[in-house]
Image: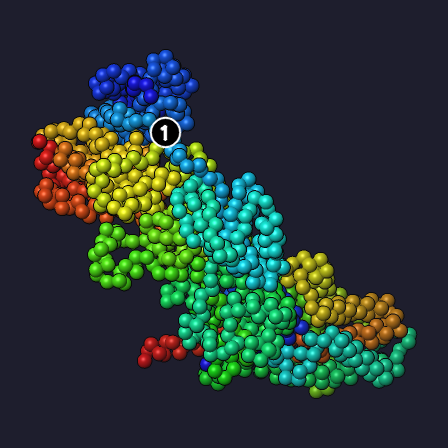
Amino acid sequence: MSIKTDPNLKKELREFGVTNVDNCYHCGNCTATCPLSTSDNSFPRKMMKYVQMGLKDKIKASPEPWLCYYCGDCSVKCPRGAEPGENMMAIRRYLTSLYDWTGFSKKFYTSEKFEYLAIGTVGLIVGLILILFHGTPDMEHAKLNSVWPAHIVEIGDVLMGGVLAFLLLSNTWRCISFILGDLKSKIPMGIYISQAKELIIHFLTQKKFAECEDRMPWFVHLMIMTGYATVFLLVVGFLAGGIHFIGLYDERLMFQRDIIYPLYHPIRLLGYYSTFALFYGVTYAMIGRLKKSKPSYKFSHSTDWMFLILLQLTTLTGILIHVTRLVDLPMPTYALYVIHMMVCIPMLVLEVPFAKWAHLAYRPVAIYLTKVKAAYVAQAGSSETAE
Amino acid sequence: MAEKKIALYVCSGCGIGDALNVADLEKNGTDECKDAQTKTHAFLCSQEGIDSIKNDIANEGVNRICVAACSQRAVYDAFDFEGCITERVNIREQVAWSHKSQDEDSQMMAEDYIRMGLVKLNESSPVEPFIPEEELSKDILVVGGGVAGLTAAKESAEAGYKVILVEKEAKLGGYQANLSKVAVLPYKGISDNNIGELVSAVESSDKITVYTSAAIEKTDGSPGLFSVTIKHGGESIEHKAGAIVMAAGWQPYDPSSLGNGYGYGKSKDVITNAMFEELIKEGTIARPSDGRTVENVVFLQCAGQRDPEHLSYCSSFCCITALKQALQVKEQNSNANVYVVYKEMRTAGHAEDLYRAAQEAGVIFIRSQEREVQAGNGLAVEALDELLGEKVLLDNLDMVVLATGVVPATATGDDVYAKVLAEGEEAVEKKKDEMAIPPDIIRASDILNLSYRQGPELPALFNDFPDSHFICFPYETRRTGIYAAGCVRRAMGISAAMEDARGAAMKAIQSVELITNGQAVHPRAGDLSYADFNLSRCTQCKRCTVECPFGAINEDEKGNPQYQATRCRRCGICMGACPERIIGFKDYSVPIIGNMIKIISMPEEDEEKPRILVFACENDAYPALDMVGLHRMQYNAWVRVIPLRCLGSMNLVWIADSLSSGFDGILLLGCQHGDDYQCHFVRGSELSKIRLSKVSETLDRMQLEAERVRYETLSINDYHKLPALLDEFAETLDGFGANPFKEF
């Protein structure tokens, strides 16, 4: 059965950031230079071909885009300026939209107008809720819990976390189905379990990224990732010192607390670490994108900027809140809190299941699936020879 | 010329004096030519050395100079003495540098070479330029008014030569006139067809006479003396011409013979690249079947090209044409889906930029060796995509454009020799003289209508193209003074055709200039010798007229050869072919070489010094032997080398003579022949090989082993193989024992 080409797919993919793909004449320098490409999962040349020919099904089933961390060596070595690195990035955006069953992601990526509108709307709703529903503010001292008590906000937190987790997991399930296809049910459960540690290792360390020649992007990425994960843990897990509404909490570990912890307190230290890590990483990336200092910063999709801006605003407002609380200014603290929430909630709600943040699941899962597949093929091969 | 006075000069520089006993060598001269004066110089090519020779010329009346020093290929400009015959004896590269120092055998070798040189000098007569009685013309005839012909005409006219341009169509412009847009150097994109500029430049030149709707009825004569009859408007016009640029062009390959896989004839929407040009002249690129503008187009490359069943060669411009046409489709509708299904994209040099432009315009390229046009229900192309490793189906196509290739104008008409074969045994028997050697392919394609004994058109090198070795002898056809350019020579695009035309025009100009001076044209440019025929002894065997690779010899009704000196390239192949030995040059003849062979001292059998005679082509094998010396490699000391203008000039009598005078073995070193020939005279080494096949009879009669005569092809960069080759041959001969004729 012959494959059917779809030249119109390329036009669609341009919206996701595919660029210069027509320049590729398949010399394979990109694949040869890539430190992560393997003979089983070779990229990026293959993906360039899929895009040129409009082979949607092939793209959909490819884990390769997620195996790439965009060091940009391929784009530098490309004799034709076909930007294989950026095209891999664009394919990741496209895949994110394919995995998303709601169709939201596609709109978010392909329409800037929709992107701004979605962020604006979510931000406004958050602001309205915070302004409309609040307790009696303490105007003498900056006490956030007097306005929005942590154990109440936590309920929203957990609700949001649940919805996001559901969306992300259901999208991830589609990702798994696309990548494995028929194999998904054929592969024995034992293999899935035996390879599970790969999932966790890659999720936590992005150690593949460190195999790229330039290790700076890996470091920056690690800073943003750990900073974000830490603060996420603090906000979702410890806003009220644990899960307050089921009674599993300790007030000594509360993140949103009116009395500031002493400097050595782990919660305060973790807060500082995440703030520093995020601020450092995001600032580095923003300057990089402005100066186009690395191949991976050469092209910036509107969603790349939006992601960085929201993250930076979240960090900055977080820092400011900390300052106003330290100097005990009640009104500015409350106002900044509203802004902080108006920025960080849309970022979480929109980016985690539908956009850039989703790669936190897709990337380790794709790596994991390639290991699963390899283990399965090896096993099938050895049982065949045994027969 | 005055009485001959020979002088021998032996150089002892460059290590010659250390390796050889120069004083003894000098004695050779006096032994051999009693009246010869001899001199030794430590640095003969120095100003002082040259001055001493010049002094002898001026004051002693010396007029024949034997220089025993380096190879004839070194410092040839220093040893050039006007009014004298100079013979170079190579005792540096081929003796001192390639054999043992202060050795008896090396010394004997050098002495032999000096004696051979002196004999040659003694027997040569001075050469004089060939100036015919008839007035020579310097006009250039250009055949074909396409881009190559027009360029050749324009360039020749600008160089100051009168040009006669003959075009068979009513208008100038050739194939290019059919095109809407062109892709030419520097290939930054596609541009408007500007052939009109070239046409008006030619039409407005007062040095160019243009005949359109004209044909050449007859081309008589020879370079410098061509007499061309042009049929034009019902009358025959005669013109004199010195040289001819043949740019008769090409035709597209007939797509109807392509077969089913290409869908031609099954669907109206399957067209060729040539038909595409006609289509686009209408204004829009629309489906031939219903006139709808096209959305999905496939360009299928190599339709019948590089395919032994159709055209075995690459037509070189179809990739660029496909890019141009694909861009034209994209210009009409940038959303159109345009595919190029190719075997290999061949966009050499700057044309790569056009490839890039097409890629940037969104043309999709699919590399595939297995592809099929499906023209049943709707039009589709199925192709095995090599980069995917899977078959892809391109369907809902509006048009498939097949890249059919170039068929040169010389490919039409019957092959003169095939015709004889087809006429049956009787005809072959009648023409057995002609059929004795593998015939050239000459088709009666009605372009030049040459009155040459070997056929009316240019012989083809391969695939009916009258091409030549592309590095060594560009534009040179097998007919001296006639230079092929453009697609008739080899498939090429517009830019290449223009360059080709300039090259061919240059060659034509060189040809008329040399001929005016009475000199040979390429490859022995400047040679003043030419062949003498002693016709009173001719037996009309036709060997010379058949074997001359350049058709230089016509025949009268009785079969007597009619030598056309200005067609001749002075290779001496006729001299080698002639069984009666009636052909020779003043400084190169059967007796001269024969006497050189005889002068070589032949040691008695009990001395255990065998002798091997090497006939080496002076264009490749001889320089290869020099290279052995330059690299200070050593080779067998039994060897004696005689350089030949071409191995094809080897006359069998030399073989018989040398065997009967006691040589133990004979080695013939010639050049590669065939499609990728390196022979300067195209067929010389091949002909000598064929001739040699008749030698075994002679050897049998003499009761000698056939292996005593060996033939090898050699190119100059094979020099390092020579010592082993010579040693191995010596060993073989050793196995046979000494030549029994030594005793007589």
Question: Which residue lies most toward the top here?
Answer: B59
- Residue B129 sits in which quadrant? top left
Residue A54 % position (x, y): 57, 74
Q: Quadrant of the C terminus of chain B?
A: top left
Q: Nearer the viewer, residue A282 or B401?
A: B401
At x 30%, y 28%, the residue is B90
Q: Nearer the viewer, residue B550 or B79?
A: B550
Q: Nearer the viewer, residue B545 or B462?
A: B545
- Going by the image, does A126 lie left or right of A47? right
Residue A9 % position (x, y): 60, 75
- Going by the image, does A87 lie left or right of B313? right
At x 59%, y 46%, the residue is B205
- Going by the image, does A241 lie left or right of B453? right
Residue B678 % position (x, y): 35, 46
Asked if A283 appears above or below A172 in the picture, the reply is: above
Residue B395 % position (x, y): 53, 79
- Residue B637 sits in which quadrant? top left
At x 46%, y 76%, the residue is B265
What is the secondary structure assignment of the residue under circle 1? loop
Label 1 belongs to which residue? Answer: B128
At x 82%, y 67%, the residue is A320
Asked if B435 appears above or below A267 in the picture, the reply is: above
* Residue B502 in view: no
Q: Residues within 10 Å of mark 1 (few under 14, many from 20)?
A: few
Q: What amino acid is found at the position of numbered circle 1 in the picture?
A: Glu
Q: Quadrant of the N terminus of chain B?
A: top left
